[in-house]
Amino acid sequence: IPDAPTSAPIPGAPAAAPVSGTLSPTQSAFDILLLYLSAISPDGGAALEDPSSPQYQAAEWLFANPNLSTYSETEINQRYALATIYLSTDGDNWTLNDGWMGESTPECTWVGIGCETALVPSRSLSAMSNTSSKGLRGISNNNNGDDNKRRAQETMMIVKKVQLFELGLRGPLPSEIAILTDTIDISAYGNSLIGTIPDAIADITGLEILQLDGNLMTGALPSGIFDLVELTKVRLESNSYTGILPSTIGKLSKMEVFRVDANMLSGMLPEEMSQMTALTDLWVSDNAFTGSIPDMSGAAGAEDMYFHNNALTGVMPAPMCELSSLVDLTSDCAGTPPLVECSCCTKCYPEGR
């Protein structure tokens, strides 16, 4: 891992020395920080090897904070992850960025960040480093260490919501968002995010809401999304995603709103979708799906189901026509002959045929 550049105004800039798995007494505090951040990074620290990367810049920003020696492991994790998001998405030019990157401003007060109290490990970075020299910013790991000991756990504010919608974010969503493992809501819709959804998002196992609609994102949907069984709302419409919906989508039994319309998805709609019995809204329209429409009648509370503007064929499953809660049901049932035979659809496409 490279050292902090000499031109950067970073106090205590590290001497030129490679970081190994075990720190030597001469290694710098910045090296300790980089080693720790590499260990928690989804890419194993690869991005931290590039001094021009948002990840390295976030590490520099974190190291320059005079309060760093007082931060717990949780605070370091959260501030690093959020700083990386900010730097990756042109945070200085967001339409609103109150509090962000403030040296003494708690991250839980930054605009768009919601936190809750929880019991977490209270270790500081110096307590986690295996060096006999002075640790981060001169915190000593001596034998008595009474002044530096903390309780095994303490109550802290934990990031639960990252709600950065319609703020003018531009750039890729970095994988470091997955360091925020307790997050339940990631909402960054209506921005100009590019690139793919990070695979590491699957590490946020308690995620309930994922809203990235109305961006410029591409690529296949990470398979790990369909293992996030706590999800209740996924809105990914109006992007340029490609690929398929896997059969593991059936694991999402708590899903209430699932929207992937207006993308470039293809393949067959998995029969396992019928296991999404909590659905109220299902939008798969305006893609390139083929095959037949699965029987979604198990979703007894379904209100809106949109299947139109695809290459789906066959007959709308009869049990779906019996759903008393349905308000809108669409398919490509216009034309002669229609692609889909549907006697109960509220609207048939293509329109005007």
Image (spheres, grey):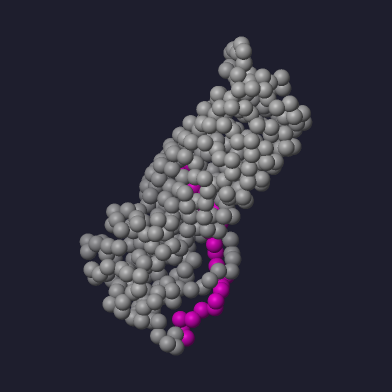
Q: Confirm whether the magenta stretch covers residue 166.
A: yes
Residue at 39% of width from left, 59% of height from top? 44
In-image side of 157 versus 274 (left or right): left
Q: Nearer the viewer, residue 334 or 56?
A: 334
In percent of width and height, residue 257 lies at 63, 40
Q: Confirm whether the magenta stretch covers residue 276.
A: no
Which picture quadrant has residue 192?
top left
| Rendered-image quadrant of the N terminus | bottom left
274 versus 88 height, above or below:
above
Which picture quadrant has residue 66?
bottom left
| Rendered-image quadrant of the C terminus | top right
243 versus 335 height, above or below:
below
Q: Tell me, yes or no, if residue 105 can be seen here.
A: no
In-image side of 324 versus 156 (left or right): right
In percent of width and height, residue 116 lies at 58, 61
Q: Which residues are magenta?
A: 146-168
